[in-house]
Amino acid sequence: MKAIVQDGYGSQEVLKLQDIEKPVVEDDEVLVRVRTAAIHAGDWLLVTGRPLLFRPGFGFSKPRKRVPGFDFAGTVEATGRDAKGFHPGDEVFGDAAHGSCAEYVVVSEDKVEVKPANLTLEQAAVVPVSGTTALRGLRDAGKVRAGQHVLINGASGGVGTFAVQIAKALDAEVTGVCSTKNVEMVRSIGADHVIDYTRNDFTKNGERYDVILDNVANHSLADCRRALTPDGILLTNNGTSGNRWIGPLGRMAAAAVLSLFVRKQRPPFYAPVRKRDLVDLKKLIEAGKVTPVIDRTYPLSETGDAMGYIGEGHARGKVAITV
Ligand SMILES: NC(=O)c1ccc[n+]([C@@H]2O[C@H](COP(=O)([O-])OP(=O)(O)OC[C@H]3O[C@@H](n4cnc5c(N)ncnc54)[C@H](OP(=O)(O)O)[C@@H]3O)[C@@H](O)[C@H]2O)c1
């Protein structure tokens, strides 16, 4: 099968289109013919191998998993003996946690769901990682309630475009923070207020928020907390800030330690995709409350360019790869 293969770390040039063996489905897995894959900020870390402190997990000189990509949507081709929830021909979406930038992917049954009826496969492919992060950040970690004022920093990105819509679905009043070119888009997906960060600093404008979801890490934790109401909480969601050695780990460690003593500071949350979250996202999508925002679509052979674009940190919604 055709797949993108990575045999070292670097920039997008390390990603090459090759023919490799089609994966073999295990008992609890589903084999999917991928139609669209999607990439996110975390995929870029695996291309660069940065921060270096992550290398024991990634692989020291090259990634342990050669085929990148988490998100996918496609058609079930075969099922393992114990994967009884799916049948060949089902149109599904899910998170393969590596390997989706390929014609076929095998994935555990509990990371796949039948795609939302009102989405194309391309739209469905971009939902799992970013949608789950936004859902679990706001609903579970943030416990957002109706009427609360929620600020999404990085509202125009992959996570942010889901977060704005999910916060609205939770009946919150929503402020999105983005650059000038994205103000109208963020408003169009439901934000009640939009702050253009090139003109206005949300940590200094005197407004107070009940929940801040920070996807960017461009302000100190203390500055973000000062923009909260007395009972407000700060959700620190960032995997791409910091230097080449420790990356976001310093900020994450600070958030984790501070959360033990400072009520407004919540620990960083990690939101791996679960089937029940895919089901909840599907309900929101089919109810018309959430619609994926796709910025660009690249062919599989140009996955490197797609990754480079994600690495620039200014995607306008999600980036999809047609397989
Ligand atoms: N917790 C988890 O399980 C989990 C899962 C996935 C991702 N993440 C993390 O979530 C973060 C966001 O990911 P993503 O996929 O949404 O990234 P993304 O798609 O690359 O989006 C980044 C967004 O940040 C905005 N931005 C850049 N500078 C900004 C600033 N100074 N103020 C406000 N917005 C700014 C950009 O908007 P403009 O173009 O308008 O500047 C862009 O839309 C990443 O650090 C990622 O590692 C965490």
Image (cartoon, rainbow, N blue to C red):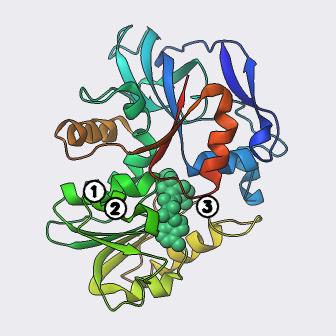
Cβ atoms at labels 3 and 1 below 8 Å apart: no
Distance of label 3 from label 1 (alpha carbons)? 27 Å
The three-letter code of the residue at mark 2 reads: Glu
- Report the side of 115 relative to 247 (left or right): left
The three-letter code of the residue at mark 1 reads: Ser
Does 95 appear above or below 309?
above
Residue 145, position in %: x, y? 18, 66
Report the mark closest to the observer, 3 or 1: 1
Q: Earlier in the sequence, mark 2 or mark 3?
A: 2
Q: Classify mark 1: residues with Cα within 10 Å, few (<14), some (14-19) or many (20+).
A: few
Q: Earlier in the sequence, mark 3 or mark 1?
A: 1
Look at the image and tell me in which quarter the N terminus lies. top right
* Residue with the mark numbered 2: 184
Q: Which of the 4 image quarters holds residue 70?
A: top right
Residue most extreme to the right: 61
* Residue with the mark numbered 3: 240
Cβ atoms at labels 1 and 2 below 8 Å apart: yes
Q: Residue at x 67, y 51 (%)?
A: 45
Does 262 appear above or below 69?
below
The three-letter code of the residue at mark 3 reads: Thr
Residue 188's label in the rendered image is 1
Look at the image and tell me in which quarter the C terminus lies. top right
Distance of label 1 from label 2 (alpha carbons)? 6 Å
- Report the side of 181 relative to 174 (left or right): right
Residue 157, position in %: x, y? 46, 56
Q: Residue at x 37, y 23 (%)?
A: 92
Distance of label 2 from label 3 (alpha carbons)? 26 Å
Q: Nearer the viewer, residue 166 or 306?
A: 306
**Ligand 1 has an atom within 8 Å of the beta carbon of the residue at disc 3:** yes
